[in-house]
Amino acid sequence: MIYNKKVTSKNQSKINTDTKILFISSTGGHFSELMQLKPLMEKCQYHIVTEKTKTNSNLKEKYKKNINFLLYKTKKEPFKYIFVLLANCFISLYIYLKIRPQVIITTGTHTAGPMCCIGKILGSKVIYIETFANRTTKTVTGKLLYLVADTFIVQWEEMLQIYPKAQYYGWIY
């Protein structure tokens, strides 16, 4: 489990109730991984960003002002996807400027890329956690954010061969 004593004791003094952390991921499995970090959310001023779908419409009731949504679109329709991605870049900029997080933590995927790049340019620390689903290959977002992230975490020890500068703490689950 990544959120364990090894990680928390190392970073405990850096995270307090005044620390603004934006947690972002696409919907589905990436979001499930991100929600494994709830204990960290309880220790800071958190904000969650994910894609709006029918299956997660109840999140607004649960997280109220601590959640925002991006547009959902898969890459199965490349032409429409380009426009949704462009719109999400502008929405991400708006959300970023509204929240002004000190740290952005993401488990991916394409939804998180623009927010992490915006955050890096505007001075936030970026922490990327490569998905549990990939054990031997890089993800597209992982390739991009490996260059951007201040901390790049993998959940499989084998992934250290692919991402030599990454840190391994185990699984999120």
Image (cartoon, grey):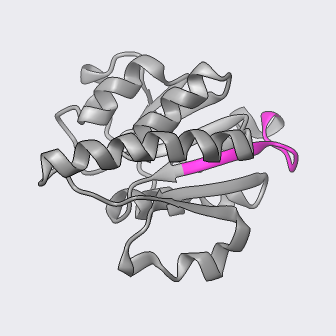
Q: Is residue 44 left or right of residue 170?
A: right
Q: Is residue 128 left or right of residue 30?
A: right
Q: Is residue 131 visible?
A: no
| x and y, in percent, of residue 74 in the image | 22, 56
Q: Is residue 170 magenta?
A: no
Residue 29, picture quadrant: bottom left
| x and y, in percent, of residue 81 in the image | 23, 48
| x and y, in percent, of residue 173 in the image | 43, 60
Please report the residue visible at 69 percent of the width from the left and 63 percent of the height from the top: 66
Residue sitting nearer the eye, 8 or 131: 131
Please report the residue visible at 77 percent of the width from the left and 40 percent of the height from the top: 12
Up-down: is 24 above or below 66?
Answer: above
Q: Is residue 150 visible?
A: yes
Please report the residue visible at 44 percent of the width from the left and 76 percent of the height from the top: 56
Please report the residue visible at 69 percent of the width from the left and 43 percent of the height from the top: 8
Residue sitting nearer the eye, 41 or 169: 41
Q: For the magenta stretch, what is the residue range?
A: 14-23
Tell how many labels.
0
Up-down: is 32 above or below 59?
Answer: above
Up-down: is 54 above or below 120?
Answer: below
Residue 32, picture quadrant: bottom left
| x and y, in percent, of residue 171 in the image | 41, 50
